[in-house]
């Protein structure tokens, strides 16, 4: 999932598949960072019978959305979120 103001599914990881693309082709509005939208989109992409995990690469500066609400939904779904902080 890639996100800015909105979010888009860039690629789905399938069972047994280990290849991940390093090229982002989805177009998202880059004028905001909506962590809620990104996390919510990632939660929806997790198959119901799968153990999910979300890895967020971000500077952590949410400029849109309600991050707390997304974190609460992930916690309720028992989906851990790992964060890789970006500093630039």
Image (cartoon, grey):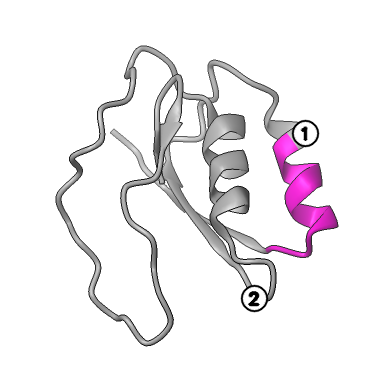
What is the residue that sits farthest to the top in this orientation?
A: 31
Where is residue 76 shown, x and y percent of the image?
A: 85, 55
Q: Is residue 75 magenta?
A: yes
Circle 1 sits on which residue? 69
Circle 2 sits on which residue? 51
23 or 50: nearer the eye? 50
Q: Secondary structure at mark 1?
A: helix
**Count of numbered marks:** 2
In the displayed structure, 48 sits above or below 1; it is below
Viewport quadrant of the C terminus: top left
Res 35 label = none
Q: Which residues are magenta?
A: 70-79
Q: Main secondary structure of the magenta part?
A: helix
Comparing labels 2 and 1, the label whose residue is closer to the camera: 2
Where is residue 68 shown, x and y percent of the image?
A: 75, 33
Q: Secondary structure at mark 2?
A: loop
Q: Is residue 49 left or right of residue 15?
A: right
């Amino acid at each position: 999932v890639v996100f800015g103001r909105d979010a888009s599914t860039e690629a789905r990881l399938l069972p047994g598949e280990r290849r991940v693309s390093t090229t982002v082709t989805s177009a998202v509005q880059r004028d905001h960072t909506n962590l809620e939208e990104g996390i919510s989109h990632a939660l929806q992409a997790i198959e119901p019978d799968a153990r999910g995990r979300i890895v967020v690469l971000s500077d952590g500066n949410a400029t849109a959305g309600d991050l707390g609400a997304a974190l609460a939904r992930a916690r309720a779904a028992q989906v851990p979120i790992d964060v890789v902080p970006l500093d630039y």
